[in-house]
């Protein structure tokens, strides 16, 4: 079992007024159509789910940690204790409109299977993750010669729950591999704010600290 | 019922079964209880307790369903044992099931022995206690009777139904049989069907009762005997299944009871033996042996999916009820896998479900004990469900 991953991998918590939603959560929430059915995989303390429910979404959550389940249930959210790596297989096809994986992909044991299940269970998948291709991380590895640690990703390599880091480029490759269509992609800065500049992918991979992708199934799965 | 014809000593022996110190709802021949076995139970009565006040909208009622050897005395001093109510940690003013907010009801189950009609009640057709003439009842029969009690109390819809173990089975049956009457459901440490292992344990208990010569084919009340030893052994064996290896080791280890060394006899040398003997002998003071047979049978027969073509999800299809399913890591009687099966079915039926597994070494009994995590989850679930129901704080 993994330890409970720190899901606020942005500095969004420090930058917002009390009671306001995290900026990266708002980015995710804006990708979800109101009134839809949503499964939030690795929902943490349920903050994103609550934001979605305020927007008229019928939300469900899966969370590994008891503390997270407890906090979520206390907020009136429908959250079950479970593991993204093992429990998604139990969900029927097309059970949800969206399946969300917020800041959790890098902590799963089998990220590819998780994304495949998400696209089977939901018509859309929303995935957000920290971008390991960010220039600061590249510089730390290049000049420090050690696994990079940043203020957003402070754990040592041996203690981190984040066992499958990837870059934006890596994730785009995974999407192609599993036959996912990339409908939208947003890069975020260190505070979780979207970078709304027109730029090529290699540039996002360099300056985005976070990325949020909205995926959908290709109409025919044989496209793969 | 028919008290005038009873000999005074028999009435004393029947005690709470005939003259409960509880509210009693009586259902005459115009309101028979239809049974799964095909027959009817009539007349019959339900002994129940209530706590708190029903609001004017009649929307704040919580039904507690008791476990195999529980009763309606959830949160008051027990009239026979003088001990605190069996769920006083959970139910009461300011407790997770807050009787300041919720009108809380608990009814003694059909087949039990604390005032609701069961095998220790007088059969008015014969003037004798039913004994084995009492019909075999099911969890669904117990729930059907509770629904009649709610009709009697003028409560159309429950805010919540909660219970552990056999109580949890009733919660699931409520949600399946009367989805429109249940706003929120809290099945704890239970399953949608009794496993082969659990049926096996029950059978050991029943055989222990029936092997006692004082059982007299179930007619011990009329014949002024009592199968104490058999029922005590049944309770001792069952009690082990409610705990865990770790809990027994922590509580007793291999310690001796009031002695420094083994006595080389079959005396209760070990603390754990002494504890089990005490559990057995105190149980027989408050429980009827035939009720034990009937209620264990009701649990054995429970298989919710079987009523829905073998597909559990069909039992909850389209339900609007909110669920909070809870299990305990060291519960080997109703292990977490059983609760996950419930959650799986609820998910497939698109129900609104929360599920938490609580880490404890206290075994199945954990639902009755001081478990802060359990209390926090129940409080949170009911609080938010109450807000959704429009209950005032």
Image (cartoon, coloured by chain):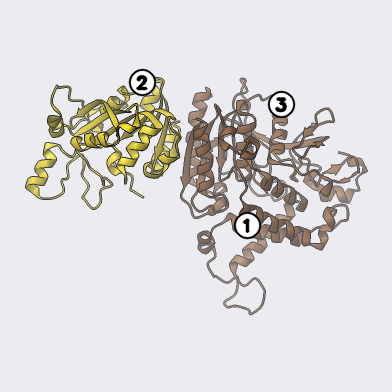
Tell whether label 1 touches label 3 (CB within 8 Å): no
Image quadrant where one finds the N terminus of chain B: top right
Is residue A45 among what the camera can see?
no
Q: Residue A177: horizontal and vertical position, in percent?
A: 26, 37
| Residue at the extreme front of the image, as rendered | A222
Look at the numbered disc 2 and give the secondary structure of its residue.
Answer: loop
At x 45% / y 31%, what residue is drawn?
A76
| Colour-to-chain, brown | B
Q: Chain of mark 1?
A: B
At x 49% / y 55%, what residue is drawn?
B361
Q: Colour of chain A?
A: yellow
Q: Which residue is mark 2?
A: A33
- Closer to the chain start, of discs 3 and 1, is 3
| Marks 3, 2 in one chain | no
Give how far apart the Cα atoms at labels 3 and 2 are.
43 Å
Is residue B303 among what the camera can see?
yes
On residue A162, the disc is none
In the image, B347: left or right of B235?
left
Q: Which residue is mark 1?
A: B239
At x 65% / y 70%, what residue is drawn?
B268
Q: Which residue is mark 3?
A: B151
State whether residue A132 is above or below residue B269: above
In the image, B280: left or right of A51?
right
Give how far apart the Cα atoms at labels 3 and 1 are.
36 Å
């Amino acid at each position: 079992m993994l330890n409970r991953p720190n899901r606020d991998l942005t500095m969004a918590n420090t930058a917002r007024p009390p009671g306001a939603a995290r900026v990266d959560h708002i980015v995710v929430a804006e990708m979800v159509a109101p009134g839809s059915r949503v499964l939030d995989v690795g929902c943490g303390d349920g903050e994103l789910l609550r934001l979605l429910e305020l927007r008229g979404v019928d939300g469900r959550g899966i969370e590994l940690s008891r503390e997270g389940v407890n906090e979520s249930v206390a907020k009136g959210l429908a959250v079950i204790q479970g593991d993204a790596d093992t429990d998604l297989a139990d969900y029927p096809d097309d059970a949800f409109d969206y399946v969300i994986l917020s800041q959790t992909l890098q902590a799963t044991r089998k990220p590819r299977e998780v994304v495949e299940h998400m696209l089977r269970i939901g018509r859309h998948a929303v995935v957000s993750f920290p971008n390991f291709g960010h220039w600061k991380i590249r510089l730390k590895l290049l000049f420090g010669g050690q696994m990079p640690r940043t203020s957003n990703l402070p754990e040592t390599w041996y203690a981190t729950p984040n066992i499958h880091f990837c870059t934006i480029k890596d994730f785009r490759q995974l999407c192609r591999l599993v036959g996912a269509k990339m409908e939208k992609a947003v890069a975020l800065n260190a505070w979780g704010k979207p970078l709304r500049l027109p730029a090529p992918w290699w540039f996002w991979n360099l300056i985005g600290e976070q990325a949020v992708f909205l995926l959908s199934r290709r109409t025919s799965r044989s496209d793969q | 019922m028919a008290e005038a014809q009873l000999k005074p000593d028999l009435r004393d022996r029947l005690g709470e079964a005939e003259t409960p110190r509880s509210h009693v709802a009586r259902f005459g021949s115009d309101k028979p209880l239809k049974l799964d076995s095909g027959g009817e139970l009539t007349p019959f009565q339900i002994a129940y307790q209530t706590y708190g006040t029903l609001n004017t909208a009649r929307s704040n009622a919580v039904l507690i369903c008791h476990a195999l050897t529980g009763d309606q005395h959830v949160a008051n001093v027990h009239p026979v044992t003088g001990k605190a109510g069996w769920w006083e940690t959970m139910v009461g003013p300011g407790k997770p099931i807050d009787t300041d907010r919720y009108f809380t009801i608990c009814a003694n189950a059909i087949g039990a022995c604390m005032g609701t009609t069961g095998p220790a009640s007088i059969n008015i057709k014969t003037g004798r206690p039913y004994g084995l003439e009492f019909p075999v009842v099911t969890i669904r029969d117990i729930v059907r009777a509770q629904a009649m009690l709610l009709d009697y109390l003028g409560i159309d819809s429950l805010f919540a139904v909660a219970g552990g173990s056999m109580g949890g089975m009733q919660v699931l049956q409520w949600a399946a049989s009367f989805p429109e009457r249940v706003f929120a459901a809290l099945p704890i440490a239970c399953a949608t069907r009794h496993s082969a292992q659990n049926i096996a344990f029950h059978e050991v208990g029943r055989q222990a009762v029936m092997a006692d010569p004082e059982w007299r084919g179930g007619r011990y009340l009329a014949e002024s005997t009592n199968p104490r030893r058999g029922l005590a052994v049944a309770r001792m064996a069952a009690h082990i299944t409610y705990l865990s290896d770790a809990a027994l080791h922590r509580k007793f280890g291999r310690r001796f009871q009031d002695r420094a060394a083994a006595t080389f006899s079959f005396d209760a040398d070990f603390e754990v033996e002494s504890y089990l003997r005490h559990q057995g002998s105190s149980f027989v003071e408050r429980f009827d042996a035939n009720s034990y047979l009937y209620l264990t049978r009701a649990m054995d027969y429970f298989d919710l999916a079987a009523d829905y073509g073998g597909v559990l999800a069909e039992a909850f299809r389209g339900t609007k009820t909110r669920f909070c399913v809870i299990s305990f890591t060291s519960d080997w009687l109703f292990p977490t896998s059983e609760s996950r099966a419930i959650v799986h079915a609820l998910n497939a039926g698109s129900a609104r479900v929360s599920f938490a597994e609580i880490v404890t070494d206290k075994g199945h009994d954990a639902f009755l004990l001081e478990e802060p995590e359990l209390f926090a989850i129940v409080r949170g679930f009911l609080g938010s469900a109450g807000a959704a129901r429009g209950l005032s704080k």
